[in-house]
Amino acid sequence: MGEEVDRAAQNLTVASHYNSRKDVGRQAREASPIVHMKRLNNWVKATLIGTYTQRGDAVLDLASGKGGDLAKWQASEIALYVGADIAASSVEDSRNRYNADQRPFPARLFSGDAFAADLASLLQDDLPFDVVSCQFAFHYAFDAEDRARNSLKNIAALLRPGGAFIATVPDANVLVRKLRNADGLKFGNRIYSVEFDEKHADKRFSKDSPFGNKYVFNLLDAIEDCPEYLVPMETLEALAEEYGLQVERAQNFHEYHLSASRKPENAQLLQRMNVMHNARAGTTISPEEWEAARVYMVLVLRKKGNAPRRERMWPPRHFKLPAGAVVNLDEL
């Protein structure tokens, strides 16, 4: 009972944090003190989506937020979009954004805890998915073993054989290394901070207790006192194997930036998005932003086997989601 209360409180904390984040205009976004880091994050997501998504794919977007990646999915000419997020107001923002921009693909939206839900049963009619995505949120599933397992079980059940799970998560190896190099339990710079509690005073993390290793994360102009969890790669690989998934790619953002930008189209996008520098504004990514970017990594899991995609092409039209179309997972 106590564990359920703690989990509910944590979900409320995370949902409240993201519900409180309001969309701002272009001018405010450009004035952000971490504008280049935000552009880097968007470039990483755009190149991941572009690399692992094909025309006609069915996509499940876990932690879909306010729908900020809808344009990226549209650029890949997907045939079906399903989004789920724990923050109800964010999902409503996503619905409004979907409707305002006249998307050429149908969509379904869910609010609630997707890491605890039986998504495979709920989405039976939409199976299989070609791509499952979870950007900057998969680590929340690692607060407990049952949620991590349920998440991977869902991903495996939802993907077609050969389908991909693409994610961006905190890099546990980098976080632990920085913790051990710090004088105390807190490290970072002027734009970000990570703080572990006294439970981790010895700075050791047992392989027998890979779940629930919490820290509090702050990122200037983005995240405030949000509880997050380590995702140990050894544990993830073992769990993924149990559910028929293989780790195909696991790269820190710094390494991913180097390797992905070797593709001409990604390098062009990097320049077009003014990620590393903006000649017109006379700005470049700061050393502090670049250091903060190293906290994250790219993760790709592939479902074993191979199966043809389900054909889902629609007559040319613009789809709409009416008011009340969002389904609450926690009420099912």
Image (cartoon, rainbow, N blue to C red):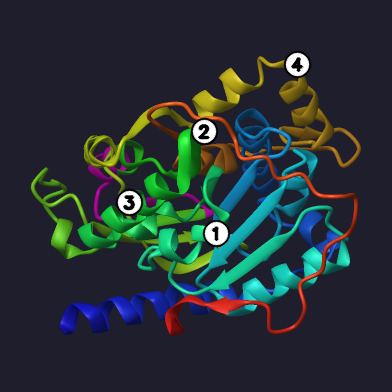
Q: State whether residue 297 appears in this view.
A: no
Q: Which mark is residue 264?
A: 4
Q: Quick one: label 1, few (<14), some, or many (20+) residues within 10 Å?
A: few
Q: Earlier in the sequence, mark 3 or mark 2?
A: 3
Q: Comparing marks 3 and 1, which lies closer to the viewer?
A: 1
Q: Which residue was labeled with disc 1?
A: 125
Q: CA distance from mark 4 to mark 2?
A: 18 Å
Q: Which amino acid type is marked by label 1? A: Asp
Q: Which mark is residue 253?
A: 2
**Residue 276: where, in percent of width, then height?**
71, 32
Q: Residue at x 72, y 47 (%)?
A: 79
Mark 4 vs 2: CB contact within 8 A:
no
What secondary structure is found at the residue carrying circle 4? helix
**Magenta-colored span:** 176-191
Mark 4 vs 3: CB contact within 8 A:
no
**Residue 302: where, in percent of width, then height?**
43, 32
**Residue 122: where, in percent of width, then height?**
47, 66
**Residue 281: where, in percent of width, then height?**
87, 42
Q: Earlier in the sequence, mark 1 or mark 4?
A: 1
Mark 3 vs 1: CB contact within 8 A:
no
Q: Which amino acid type is marked by label 4? A: Pro
| Front in this rendered view, residue 50 or 196 | 50
Q: CA distance from mark 3 to mark 2?
A: 26 Å
Q: Which residue was labeled with disc 3?
A: 153
Q: CA distance from mark 4 to mark 3?
A: 36 Å
Q: Residue at x 72, y 73 (%)?
A: 93
